[in-house]
Amino acid sequence: MTAIKMSESIQYKNYILLKDRRYQDTHEWIKIIEGNKVRVGITDYAQKKLKSIVYVDTPEVGKDIEKGELITTVESVKAVGEVISPVNGKILSFNEKLEDDPSLINNDPYGEGWIVEVEVTNPSELDNLLDVEGYIEVIKKEEEE
Amino acid sequence: MRKTPFLNFHKEINASIGEFSGWTMPIDYGDMLQEALITRKSVTFFDISHLSRIVVSGKDALNFLQRLVARDIKKLNVGKISGPTAFLNQNAGFKDDVMVYRLTDLVFLIVGNAINHDKIVDWLNYNSSNYNVDIKDITFDTAMLALQGPQSTEKIKKKIGEKIKNLSPLNFLTNIKTKYGEIKLISYSGWTGEAGYEIICDIDVGEKILRDLYQEKILPAGLGARDILRIEMGYNLYGNEINENINPIEAKYWIFSWKKEEDYIGKKELFNILKNGVEKVKYGLLVKKGSPLPRKGMKIYIEDKEIGFITSGTFSPLLKTPIALGYINSKHSILGLKVKIFKGNKEINAKLVEPPFIKRL
C-alpha cells in the first residue's frame, strides 16, 4: 500500500495505520480536522476483524459524550462492534453516507468511512492517546491471544 | 477439535479460519457477502468436508433405513438421492436432517450435519442390533467439495468431462476416472438455490481438485457465504431452525413421505401432530432496509405482545437488506403480518413472508 494520499502510512502485518492521527486501544482512530473539531472512526484492524459491515447505528447528534462512552455500534454479518469515544466532548455530526453504504468503513476506514465528528472539550486530551507504535502494540497483544 | 484436511490450503489463500460444529474450517476468504453474490452470479467452490458421511450396507440396509428415516426410500433408484429427509426421535423432533444416496441395492450413503455426527453414528449403531447391517463412517477418510452457482455445470463439465452431462438434480455418479484420480461420487443437489455439485473423494484427490479450481480463478466461498445463501432460500440449519424439540410440521420441512406404509421412528407422533396442529410455525422475516440485523434468540412482537423468536438472521447482499428466519405462534401465523423485533431499545420492522426470499431455479 503506497497510494494513501497526504498521510504517511505504516503497515503492520496486513493492517494499515496512519501517522497523522491517534488511536484508542478499543480500535478507534481520532484526527483533528480544525480547532476543536475531530473525526472519529474505526481502524483498519477493526474493520478487518469485523469484515463486511452492513449496518451503522445512527448516534444522537448534539449529545455530550464522555471518554469511554459508547458512541454507536457497527454491525457485520457475524459480529457487532462498539465505537467508544476516545475523548470528552459533543457529537457534532454523523457521516450520513454510512446509512446508504456502511461498507465505506471496509473500503476506506480512515477516509470516507469516518463515523462521527466531535467537538473535543480539550484538544490536549489527544496527547494521552496512542500513537502508531502504541497501537501496534495493542494489535500485537490481541493477535497473540 | 476436528479440522478440514485442507486447512493448509485455505490458509495459503488467506481464509479466515474459524470454528463450526467442532470443526476448524474456513469461514470466509475476506468478504462473505461478496462470496455469496459471486455464487449467485457465477460460481464458487466450497470445502464441505465437515459434513458427516456414513455408509450403511448389508442385507437389511434398506429395511433398517426405512425404520429410521421419514422418507420412503424403498423406491429410491440406484444413483438417486432421496431429497432432504431426517432421523426423527420418538416425539417427531429432529435428530438430524440428512440426504440418503442409494449407491447400490444394498448400500446407502447418508450425508448429514457435522454437529450431529457422533450422535447419529451412535443412533445408527444403537438401532442396528436386529438388523444385518454394516455401518461405516467415512467422514474422516474422505473429502467433500462443492461447486455452486449458475456456471457450476459448465465448469464441472470442463473439469470432469462429458460424463456428467446427463446428471440432473438429485442424481449422482460414482467411481469416475478423472485427471485428478478417481472421484468416488459426484452428485447434483446443492443448498444455495443455484445449480450445484458435490464431490466425495479421497483427500489427496480433493487437494488436487481444490488447487486446480483455484488456479482456474474459480473463487472460494466459506461457511459465512453458505449461511447467507441458505437463509436467502429459507433452508433450515440444524441447531437454529431445527433441533430435537422442533418437529417437521412446525418447520414446514417436508422431510417425510405422506404415504409411506412402513413404520418409522417418530411416525406415530408426527401424524398425531398433523392431526392436532402445532403451536408455532416457521416464517421468513423480510426486514426494512437500513435496519440492524436480527439475531438468533431475539423476540418478535406485535405491539407489546411477544409472538415469536428469531432462529437465524443475516444480511442478503442480493436484496441489500437484512433477512431472518423464525417461529411465530400459530395464532399469529398470518402471511404479510407486520411485526417488530426488539434489539436492546432499537425497534426493527419486519414483515412475515414465506421463503425463499429470492426466486431461483
Image (cartoon, grey):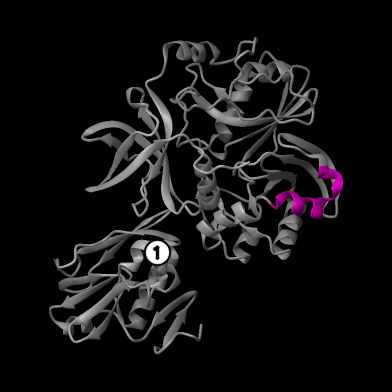
Q: How many tags in the picture? A: 1
The disc numbered 1 marks a residue on which chain? A
Instruction: Check if residue B156 falls in the magenta segment.
Output: yes
Q: Amino acid at mark 1?
A: Asp
Q: Is residue A94 left or right of residue A51?
A: left
Q: Main secondary structure of the magenta part?
A: helix
Seen as rendered, the residue at the extreme front is: B336
Give how far across and how far down residue B251 sits, in percent: 47, 28
Question: SS at mark 1?
Answer: loop
Give how far across and how far down residue A121 sits, in percent: 12, 78
- Of B219 and A79, the residue lying toward us: B219
Q: Is residue B334 left or right of residue B176?
A: left
Residue located beneath label 1 in the image = A101
Q: Quadrant of the C terminus of chain B?
A: top right
- Of A53 and A26, the residue lying toward us: A53
Query: Which stretch is magenta?
Result: B151-165
Point 63% across, 45% down: residue: B194
| Residue A100 occupies quadrant | bottom left
* Crowding near the residue tagged with mark 1, few <14, some 14–19, many ≥20 C-alpha atoms within 10 Å: some
Vertical arrangement, residue B209 with respect to residue B98, above or below: below
